Amino acid sequence: MIGSIGEILMAISLMIFIAGLLRWTFGRGPQGALPDENGDLGLLETVAVVPTRESADVLVGKLAREKVRVTVSHREDGWALLAFPRDANDARLVLHAL
């Protein structure tokens, strides 16, 4: 059973209000972490910096084969490979052996 025009308009306006509220609350875009003076992002440590994304992906693949977890971040001076402190030394050792 379809409600009256007033009820339909009220439901539509309520949905628009909720959508606007959610967009205002969660739609601010990615904030991201700001690097400190060493270029580190929060708990992550920089283990290497390479000039291109492709070379970063190659190194990430080699580290993954050695079971070392890293992530990639773009910086002004290139692409940084970042690891948590417990994985940083292992990542450096693997990269040094290359």
Image (cartoon, rainbow, N blue to C red):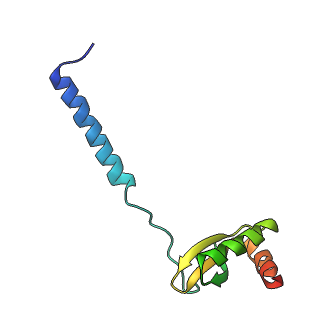
**Residue 42 x %, y %:** 58, 73
Give the residue displayed 18% in from the left and 19% down from the top: 4
Give the residue displayed 55% in from the left and 87% down from the top: 77
**Would you say residue 45 is visible in this rendering?**
no
Quadrant of the rendered structure where residue 19 is? top left
Give the residue displayed 72% in from the left and 75% down from the top: 59
Quadrant of the rendered structure where residue 95 is? bottom right
Query: Does 66 appear above or below 5?
Result: below
Give the residue displayed 22% in from the left and 18% down from the top: 3
Q: As drawn, is 23 to the left or to the right of 4? A: right
Count of numbered badges drawn on the protein: 0
- In front here: 77 or 38? 77
**Residue 57 x %, y %:** 66, 71
Q: As drawn, is 26 to the left or to the right of 72? A: left
Quadrant in which the C terminus is drawn: bottom right
Query: Does 41 appear above or below 12?
Result: below
**Would you say residue 94 is visible in this rendering?**
yes
**Residue 32 x %, y %:** 49, 68
Query: Does 68 appear above or below 18?
Result: below
Q: Residue furthest front?
A: 54
Quadrant in which the N terminus is drawn: top left
Query: Does 45 appear above or below 18?
Result: below
Q: Residue furthest top?
A: 1
**Residue 51 x %, y %:** 60, 84
Q: As drawn, is 33 to the left or to the right of 69? A: left
Q: As drawn, is 33 to the left or to the right of 82? A: left
